[in-house]
């Protein structure tokens, strides 16, 4: 059944024109009839605009109309199985998707301003036309087209619609300072954001776990976990980044930005100071206040040092705006704070022409005479009232109110997943949330929807308790089910909760350019992989599940259906990781006390011992999670690695007595080893290699889920 609504829809006090159900909703007037995608013969890019780019967006590396169209061509095939050639002309041909650029009076945001992100979609008996206000606008039109086709079973309604975002900034912020996220994850998240027309991925590139000055000595503070993620060989910043294996090189950061921009998403970088700056003080201790996480701005070398950092990394960044943090600083040093922010604004504009953003901290009433050239990212009302303190004083404000904050792992204040109820009913009057709603309970603190000083909305995920508080993909799962709904409100859509619930999983299954669920295709209902090692005559390990995921022996032998592992031999599989809700079963008999790897993959590894300990350990994101258990030597043990939602377990039993024991892998949260809480952690099943570095026997390997 095609999921769309025709006619007038009553939402609160507003009458909304006809629209199709999508994420975001798609304004669309039906004129009668249907157009099946099976009739399509080609995609045609308007030759006149093929090399045009969107100069009004946030990125400095905008794709051309041709580049966006080529990405769309691949997405049509990966999402819908529709394989079309790409051609060029100044006119559409029969049964084509014609992608072009033109102006329209309908391409306006909530404040009534023209936006380059608008598009018009026209579907008739002869084919489909996507008119973009710019190449970026045309790209958002392709997202709508794919969604319409998926929800309409590859049949589209004939008609037309004009669509444009209400706000120019829509997306998320991720704290990569306290927890490292590999480039591949960042790129996959950009694909996820893009499918729902979100256009910004704010990366918080430096930070530290909380420096409790009442708990730690100066020496202890200087050894607390703090990280600076960009890695440069420039001698001017030598020693600032002490974690090269958990960093982004120039080439990696450049590739991340370009791949995200190819899907309409801009990476916005943040380097934090003068608060949350312990990593800088650990580099140059003389720059710190008594609370070493804060810079002493009055010290002669402090501002020059901050400028040196930015001088090194400004050329890396392909966004028109950069973020210097500037939150939670010493309340008695407002004048020093103001001096640093204004001087950095002048410096960054002079050096690069870029705009600068800070978190809301000190207000004009408190004496912070920050230039109105600087945009403010509001996050909490105990710091500022964004409407009355900033917008009414001429500042542009980005809404990141902690109504949609997540703290990964655990928090006494914030949840670990987005609040879906708040998305659909978060306005003070019980209506849907929107970027102009800073206060969910007091309407007087919210500007009108058409206020031009509201930049948009960004939801933030933090890692307050450091790198071991969660696995890499936990950040995705905190957003997975609700972020698209929030994206509808960030765009200005009017999707209802029951509509969202009815279409989300259908759309989620076809999001191109990512596999964040680490889903594995399977013909069988339950069994995904089964290695019984029934033959030792070849190097091929047959997959008995019927899915064809045959493995390859690298130096190993098989005897009587048992895999013999020694001297670094291993089995290579065609798989990488299995996401949540799985059981990886196997029988194992270690014949050496030397620790070794049982299973490894791109997201995790299961170890029989780790370093000097023999405990069974899961490693993910570079962090080990060990059980109070060791596999018995020279004894067969039946093992199950179980992923169940955000929990991971190990089940073991001895074939001789049948005793079963189940243990949970837990994360230990706290500052510098000071225990705060034990919390569950979801870790993907590692599947790429079996037994590399392990000495012993293994058999009956089965993955189900």
Image (spheres, helix red, strand yellow):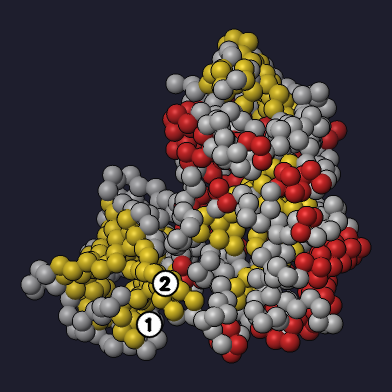
Q: Is residue 660 above or below residue 78?
A: below
Q: Position of residue 550 (x, y in %)?
A: 36, 59
Residue at x-position 28% and y-position 44%: 525
> Alpha-carbon neighbours of circle 1 within 10 Å: few (<14), some, or many (≥20)?
many
Q: Quadrant of residue 56?
A: top right
- First in sequence: mark 1 vs mark 2: 1
Residue 262 seen in render: no
Q: Position of residue 360 (x, y in %)?
A: 70, 56
Q: Are dots 1 and 2 in contact, CB under 8 Å? A: no
Q: Is residue 274 above or below residue 519?
A: below
Q: Is residue 696 above or below residue 391?
A: below
Q: Quadrant of residue 394?
A: top right
Decide which of 367, 536 is in the foreground and name it. 367
Which image quarter holds the N terminus? top left
Identify the mark at residue 519; answer none if there is no mark: none
Q: Is residue 166 above or below residue 376?
A: above
Residue tagged 2? 676
Residue at x-position 48% and y-position 58%: 413
Residue tagged 1? 610
SS at badge 1: strand
Residue at x-position 29% and y-position 45%: 524
Q: Position of residue 353 (x, y in %)?
A: 88, 58
> Alpha-carbon neighbours of circle 2 within 10 Å: few (<14), some, or many (≥20)?
few
- Report whether 699 appears left or right of 292: left
């Amino acid at each position: 059944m095609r999921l769309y609504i025709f006619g007038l829809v009553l939402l609160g006090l507003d009458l909304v024109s006809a629209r199709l159900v999508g994420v975001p909703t798609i304004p669309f007037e039906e004129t009668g009839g249907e157009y099946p995608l099976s009739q399509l013969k080609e995609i045609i890019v308007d030759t006149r605009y093929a090399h045009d780019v969107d100069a009004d967006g946030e990125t400095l590396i905008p794709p051309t109309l041709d580049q966006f169209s080529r990405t769309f061509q691949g997405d049509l095939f990966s999402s819908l199985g529709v394989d079309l050639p790409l051609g060029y002309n100044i006119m559409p041909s029969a049964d084509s998707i014609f992608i072009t650029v033109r102006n329209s009076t309908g391409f306006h945001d909530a404040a009534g301003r023209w936006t380059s992100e608008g598009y018009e979609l026209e579907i008739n008996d002869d084919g489909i036309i996507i008119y973009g206000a710019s190449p970026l606008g045309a790209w958002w039109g392709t997202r709508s087209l794919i969604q319409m086709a998926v929800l309409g079973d590859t049949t589209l309604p004939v008609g037309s619609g004009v669509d444009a975002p209400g706000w120019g900034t829509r997306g998320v912020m991720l704290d990569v300072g306290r927890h490292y996220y590999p480039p591949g994850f960042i790129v996959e998240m950009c694909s996820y954001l893009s499918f729902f027309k979100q256009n910004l991925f704010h990366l918080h590139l430096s930070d530290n776990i909380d420096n409790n000055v009442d708990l730690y000595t100066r020496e202890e503070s200087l050894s607390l976990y703090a990280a600076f993620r960009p890695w440069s060989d420039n001698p001017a910043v030598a020693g600032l980044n002490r974690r090269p294996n958990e960093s982004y090189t120039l080439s990696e950061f450049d590739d991340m930005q370009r791949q995200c921009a190819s899907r309409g998403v801009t990476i916005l970088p943040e380097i934090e100071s003068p608060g949350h700056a312990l990593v800088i003080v650990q580099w140059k201790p003389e720059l710190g206040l008594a609370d070493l996480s804060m810079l002493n701005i009055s010290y002669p070398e402090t501002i020059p040092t901050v400028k040196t950092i930015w001088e090194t990394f400004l050329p890396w960044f392909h966004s028109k705006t950069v973020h210097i943090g500037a939150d939670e600083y010493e309340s008695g040093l407002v004048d020093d704070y103001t001096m640093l922010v204004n001087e950095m604004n002048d410096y960054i504009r002079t050096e690069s022409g870029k705009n600068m953003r800070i978190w809301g901290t000190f207000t004009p009433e408190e004496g912070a005479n920050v230039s109105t050239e600087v945009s403010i990212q509001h996050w909490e009302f105990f710091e500022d009232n964004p409407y009355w303190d900033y917008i009414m004083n001429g500042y542009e404000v980005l809404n990141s109110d902690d109504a949609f904050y997540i703290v990964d792992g655990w928090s006494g204040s914030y949840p670990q997943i987005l609040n879906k109820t708040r998305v659909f009913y978060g306005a003070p009057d019980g209506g849907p949330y929107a970027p102009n709603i800073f206060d969910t309970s007091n309407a007087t603190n919210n500007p009108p929807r058409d206020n031009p000083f509201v930049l948009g909305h960004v939801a933030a995920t933090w890692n307050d308790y450091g790198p071991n508080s969660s696995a890499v993909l936990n950040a995705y799962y905190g957003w997975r089910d609700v972020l698209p709904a929030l994206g509808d409100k960030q765009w200005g859509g009017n999707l209802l909760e029951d509509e969202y619930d009815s279409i989300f999983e259908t759309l989620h299954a076809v999001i191109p350019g990512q596999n964040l669920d680490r889903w594995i295709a399977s013909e069988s209902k339950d069994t995904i992989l089964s290695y019984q090692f029934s033959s030792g005559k070849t190097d091929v390990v047959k997959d008995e599940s019927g899915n064809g995921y045959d493995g390859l022996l690298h130096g190993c032998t098989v005897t009587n259906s048992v895999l013999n592992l020694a001297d670094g031999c291993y089995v290579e599989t065609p798989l990488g990781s299995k996401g949540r809700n799985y059981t990886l079963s196997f029988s194992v008999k270690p014949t050496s006390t030397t620790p070794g790897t049982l299973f490894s993959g791109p997201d995790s590894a299961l170890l029989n011992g780790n370093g000097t300990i023999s405990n069974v350990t899961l490693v993910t994101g570079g962090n080990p999670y060990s059980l109070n258990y060791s596999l018995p030597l020279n004894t067969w043990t039946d093992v199950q690695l179980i992923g169940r939602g955000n929990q991971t377990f190990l089940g073991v039993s001895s074939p001789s007595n049948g005793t079963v024991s189940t243990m949970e892998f837990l994360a230990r949260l706290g500052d510098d080893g000071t225990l705060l809480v034990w919390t569950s952690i979801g870790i993907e099943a590692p599947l790429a290699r079996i037994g590399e570095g392990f000495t012993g026997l293994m058999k009956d390997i089965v993955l189900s889920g």
